[in-house]
Amino acid sequence: MAFPQLVFSGVQPTGNLHLGNYLGAIQRFVALQESHDCLYCVVDLHAITVWQDPAELKRCIREVTAAFIASGIDPARHIVFNQSQVSGHAELAWVFNCVARLGWLNRMTQFKEKAGKDRENASVGLYAYPNLMAADILLYRATHVPVGEDQKQHLELARDIAQKFNNDFGPSIAANGLGETFFPLPEPLIGGPAARVMSLRDGAKKMSKSDPSDLSRINLTDDADTVASKIRKAKTDPEPLPSEAEGLKGRPEAENLVGIYAALAELPKDAVLAQFGGGQFSTFKAALVDLSVAKLGPIGAEMKRLVADPDHIDAILRDGAARARVLADRTMAHVKDIVGFVR
């Protein structure tokens, strides 16, 4: 059957949103609003798979919501909410815990990376995280998910879970008058040229909130002077910029800054290099400062204004959750009938 096109995506509320989060996810969320119906979720149930201070978690949930709105996501046209306000996420995740196979979860590389050597000490939630992610998407029977490279494996798992549910319960799905398949197999929407933003101090490392040096990242809450200062201090190499993208190979810092410019200007890297190739880094950096301040300054200022009004943010989340719940409750009612629960 053909499912109506719907986009779902989520961002973890773990503090200090930076340029990597903006270019890798939020900027694309804003663009997708023009072509799709979208649900954008602050995934606070995912956040607690590792310990969170309760007061800090509340602050971070509101900060991510503020970043969504400040970046241009329209909570009136689309649904913006936090996951824990819609109980269907946890309910469907349990059903999926019983559909997914241990062997599938054992292949997930992200758990191995996050749990590290002390795997026995990781939470069960961190291990079962991909099943919850599948529930997040399929609770709304979403057809498309904007994902970075690091989440592609989890989306594959969501597709496997949807397929297995449809196969296992095929006769019951049909008997309940729901057609041949109940869940769509969600498709990835892979990012553009700067989906991976690297550290300003080391072009081989991803930009990260956990890096001890604040100079390694541009935080979305940084003011214009701070953004300008960080870009001026960003690590480069002594060579002039090449005229074509091929010339960036083996020059990770140069490639990162060109990639950031390309993503902020919404241009291909070759177009940026056609303009700045052969010139000195100082000229290019000055242009990157101007562009970054023009693009990010208003977002930071609006985020500060929104965060100072938590009641307004909470009202947006409440409204979004109420609208999300209508869709989620419909799915869960069907799932309970399909599985054979008495309602």
Image (tube, grey):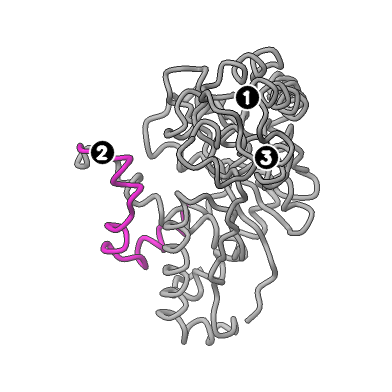
* Left or right of 31 on screen, residue 142: left
**Which residue is disc 1 drawn over?**
281
Give the SS element for disc 2: loop
**Label for residue 116?**
2
Question: Dot 3: few (<14), some (14–19), or many (≥20) neighbours within 10 Å?
Answer: many
Q: Quadrant of the N terminus?
A: bottom right
Percent x, y of residue 198:
50, 34
Q: What's the residue type where badge 3 is placed?
A: Leu
Residue appearing at x 68%, y 24% in the figure: 310
Q: Quarter-wise, where is residue 285 in the image?
A: top right
Q: What's the residue type where badge 1 is placed?
A: Phe
**Label for residue 273?**
3
| Nearer the camera: disc 2 or disc 1 | 1
Q: Is residue 170 above or below residue 274?
A: below
Magenta residues span 90-117
Q: What's the residue type where badge 2 is placed?
A: Gly
**Label for residue 329?**
none
Overall secondary structure of the magenta section? helix
Task: Using the numbered discs, state the Cα–Cα distance from disc 3 to disc 2 in whole angstroms.
Answer: 40 Å
Residue appearing at x 52%, y 23% in the figure: 238
Q: Is residue 219 above or below residue 127?
A: above
Q: Nearer the viewer, residue 140 or 225?
A: 225
